[in-house]
Image (cartoon, rainbow, N blue to C red):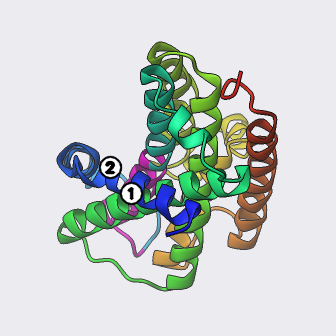
Amino acid sequence: MSGFTTLLYKEVLRFWKVGFQTVAAPVLTAMLYLLIFSHVLESRVRVYDTVSYTAFLVPGLVMMSLLQNAFANSSSSLIQSKVTGNIVFVLLPPISYREFYGAYVLAAIVRGLVVGAGVLIATAWFAPLNFEQPLWVVVFAIIGGAVLGSLGVIAGIWADKFDQLAAFQNFLIMPLTFLSGVFYSIHSLPPFWQQVSHFNPVFYMIDGFRYGFFGRSDVSPWQSLAVVACCLGLLAALTLTMLKSGYKLRN
């Protein structure tokens, strides 16, 4: 295999070998969210006229799990390699920084898709789902995973210890995902907070992904796609610049 395929295989195998922790645990967490929120709010909240709250909640939980695990895969791999010192075995072979970036981000997407599929299978029993626009589901799942995978590479490079990575996740990733409309439509918020939500890029990932199921969304899927694609382009450029310079990796 080439350097790229070998590194990709290594990264996929890394999370797959501990699948009970990296795949089964997030699926269980999403199911608990669904059981609690649907039990409390099913009879009190209806976002769309023809869509129950439980059905509305499922795609949001799928996408949230996908994004969080895509970030976790690339960031945890890099920080573990830096702390243990085995990052040198990845840096010494003749692998270009583009291949390095591609392998880590693609592995993050794979883990995100596996977890997302697991959450969808496990939660689909609770509410009937229609795939009105399945292509949008695939597009936002892949691009969203790439965005969070890139952000995970940035976090893994920047952090020098697990505490810093945990702070990055707790104070940036968690608020962005939980305040992105997973559990509610932004139209249920006061006008000020509706405007604030439009500055959250994860909102567009969730909303565009949900559009693929119901054919309805809070904003146009094309607008969501444009925002998410711009975020991916900016993060990819930043990540490639950091890798090319060897920032906190080769020094």
| The C terminus - image quarter | top right
For label 1, the SS is helix
Secondary structure state at the residue bearing disc 2: helix
Q: CA distance from mark 2 to mark 1?
A: 6 Å
State whether residue 32 is above or below residue 9: above
Return the residue at label 2.
15
Q: Is residue 42 visible?
A: yes
Image disc number at residue 37 = none
Q: Position of residue 226 (x, y in %)?
A: 78, 64
Q: Look at label 1 and name its amino acid.
A: Val
Q: Which residues are magenta?
A: 50-69
Left or right: 100, with 122 as reference point: right
Compared with 191, 166 (above or below) is: above
- Rendered image: mark on residue 12: 1
The answer to whether any part of residue 133 appears in the image is no
Q: Position of residue 98 (x, y in %)?
A: 72, 55
Q: Residues within 10 Å of mark 2 (few under 14, many from 20)?
A: some
Depth check: 120 or 125 in front? 120
Task: Find residue 77 and report its horizontal and vertical position in percent.
Answer: 45, 38
Residue that appears at 66% across and 28% down? 249
Q: Is residue 225 left or right of residue 50?
A: right
Residue 83 or residue 110, whichever sits in front: 83
Could you tell me residue 132's position as x and y percent?
Answer: 48, 86
Dominant secondary structure of the magenta stretch?
A: helix
Tags 2 and 1 in contact by the CB under 8 Å rule?
yes
